[in-house]
Amino acid sequence: MNFAQFQKLPAYLRWPVLAFVGILVLSIVQFFTDQQLLTSTTTIQTALKWAMPILIAGLGGLFAERCGVVHIGLEGMMILGTWCGAWGALQFGSPWWGLVSGIVGGALGGLLHAIATVAFSVDHIVSGVAINILAPGTARYLSERVFTQMDGGSISQSPRVESLGDFTWPILAKGPDLLGKVERLDWFLISDLFGVLRGLLFQMTYLTAIGLALVPISAFLLNKTKFGLRLRIAGEKPLAGESLGINIYRQKFLGVIISGGLAGLAGSFIVLELAGLYRQNQTTGRGFIALAALIFGNWKARGVLTGAVLFGYPFGLSLRDLEGTATRSLLLVIAIALLAVVVWALSEKNKADAILAGAVAAGSLLFFFGTETAPKWLPGTMPYVLVLLVLVFASQRLRMPAAVGLPYRKGGS
Amino acid sequence: MKSPLFRRLLLAFAAPVAAFVFAFVLSSIVLILSGYNPIDAYGEMITNALKLESMIDMLNETTPLYISGVAAAIGFRMNLFNIGVEGQYQLAAFAAAVIGAKVVLPDGLHMLFVMGVAMVVGGLYSGLAGLLKVTRGVNEVISTIMLNSVATLGIIAGLFKIFLEKKSGGAVGGGTTPLAETAWIPDLNGFVELFTREITKGRKLTGMLVVAVIVGVLYHLFINRSRLGFDVRATGMNPLAAKVGGVPSKQMVLLAMVLSGVVAGLVGMPDLLSRTHAYDQGFTKLRGFAGIAVALLGRNHPGGMVGAALLFAFLNTSSGILQITGTASSEIVTIMQGIILLAAVVAYQMVGQVKQREEVKLASEATVGATA
């Protein structure tokens, strides 16, 4: 079966196959580099948690860009979400209120972006940049007013907040722990598969479950409902939508506000589940990585999930991999993936791509053999380099919403 | 009807004035809600700014902000969003500090060499984003953001330890080996003191101010007076028409990106050549993003950006006095900057629409008149 035939398979067949191939590559690398961390329960669990803010913010970006508004301000709205998330949790004494207040904070940022871009036709990137400058300043000002009055708080961080809690699947991941038993047998591939599965079921936080559930919910909303159809027409052919009596302004406002709310949710995820408190500069550019995950995912909910897992994985791994040896073996994974790109480019008779991918693969291999442990800066940089690599090889086959970034005026003037 | 010149001036200044008034009112409301007296706060800021030493601080702050604004503006003029000034200037300053400390050159030449290294590194790094755009179709907004993180979290973080200053006894310093005095840029204190009193409190007006002025003049000549600059503007206004008119769009993208990076390379120079003389951990950050704000506020105009950079520098340098006198929280200035910026872009957009409507009306009147 060749690649074109594979692409025609229904999604529910394609995705498990791709996931399986991914785990297969990881186990092969693991086998040859004598590692266990790449597919261990703890790594998968951490990686999943670290992928969540990227995923949720990426879904936020999805709603904005599908209705035609470029959303470079995701980062700023995530920052508002982090501050409001911590504030809500402290003010009302429950992390669930933190969640709600984080969503509201992000949505207010979304409203601001919508007013600027939709109501006043300000360039979307300009407005986004302005919000990214305004948001950290606002958060710092508010911290100075609010958190410095609290015990353990300061201008740059809040007192500790509680997490929303987690749950472990009985029988499969605890008690008899069937999955764990197989994982510990250390059989090639099979133990790895069970390790990954157990990582998904062991101590999953409720918020992670919500984040994962948002993927099918977003896909359903966008693709199967009247609301989604109207939203998408605002991003594809707004004038055609207008001629059918759809209020394009309303759709765009809704899309951007939902988008801000999701970015705020992603921000409160960082506060409630990853850090346990608000800290200045806590988002560390994840809003931008979310945007890259959105582009990588070709403006589709499932694609955003893949992008988020891909970009979140090195972060999660590096937190578990204190010696840096497992992160080093990721270089081998990257080389293998690039060699796959070479083969695929050759089959498409695309010499330039093949040479470029081959050269980068060779560089990655050289790096792998030249080091014993990964340097400290590598895991933090890897997602950004991955984004660049993916865009270098995939940019030309991605399709963004047709009217994204274009100003819309009623009546087409 | 009023005179056309008056109308033009009114339209040109309506937006910034409206934005400023709006931001002023909104900031006052924020101050009152926080329990501060806005009149006291503004009064303190202005009294402080009128002192000679504060003015020196302000100009020292204006210099890198203006250069950073020009770097961003070169891209904006052709609808290229170089969000990567931040990474470009950090990498350029780091490379210039490392390479500059390794060479021995006569006075003056050494300084120019360091600046040259910074410009080349900045240009190469932004050129990478340009190359990715023209050859692989990678959107420059995403690629420059990613390259920012690669530069600061990856390249600089990875190489920083290798090039730390080695002191006697095997100890290492907190930054790269300091530049020799031959690479320091002379200060302008002597020149300023010709007109005013003696500058006290150890304040030194950076010589990079002269470079910033040169950059501004060259930017004006390039954009408004050169053929290449015309091509850049044409591509920015209507890429298709420019292409049909024979402007090679790919070369234009590459050129604008590289030039933007070359100027970005200079952003770190006021710090490197006249203050720290080395790249250390506390090397000033975030000037690249502030430059984007300056370019947006100054409408990419060489003169407008001077005003924008001065305004932002005024706000930055007055944050300290607010804290010291307790008249307001020093963080209010970042909020003011954000509000001014957002209000300004909205106001510019609205005035632009009014202008466009008038032009359409005038054009239609003219054509009706011609056919009648």
Image: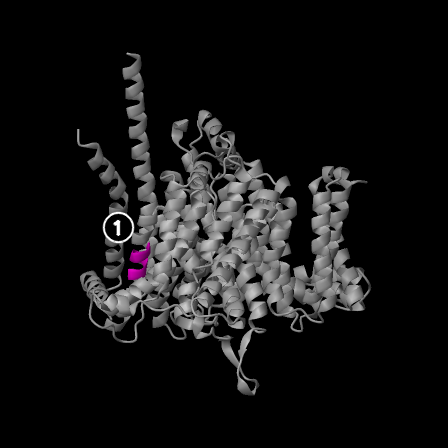
Quick check: B285 left or right of A305?
left
Colour scheme employed for the rendering of this structure = one colour
Q: Position of residue A283 (x, y in %)?
A: 49, 61
Residue furthest to the top in view is B372
* Residue receiving disc 1: B20
- Residue B178 vs A73, above or below: the answer is below
Residue B47 or residue A359, whichever sits in front: A359
Quarter of image, res B230: top left
Could you tell whether A269 is left or right of A169 in the image?
left
- Image quadrant occupied by the C terminus of chain B: top left
**Residue at the spot 57% in from the left edge and 57% down from the top edge:** A52
Above or below, comparing residue B5 to residue A155 in the picture: above
Magenta range is: B309-314
Q: Nearer the viewer, residue B185 or B242?
A: B185
Q: Position of residue B157 (x, y in %)?
A: 56, 68
The main secondary structure of the magenta stretch is helix
The extreme front residue here reads B106
Does A238 appear in magenta? no
* Residue B119 horizontal/vertical position (percent): 49, 58
**Number of numbered discs on residues:** 1
**Residue A279 seen in the current view:** no
* A110 over A238 or under it: above or below: below
Q: Is residue A1 above or below residue B265?
A: above
Query: Label 1 sits on what residue type?
Result: Phe
Q: What is the secondary structure assignment of the residue under circle 1?
A: helix
Chain that bears disc 1: B
Can residue B248 be seen by looking at this rendering?
Answer: yes
Position of B308 with respect to A34 (left or right) is left
Q: Nearer the viewer, residue B239 or A63?
A: B239
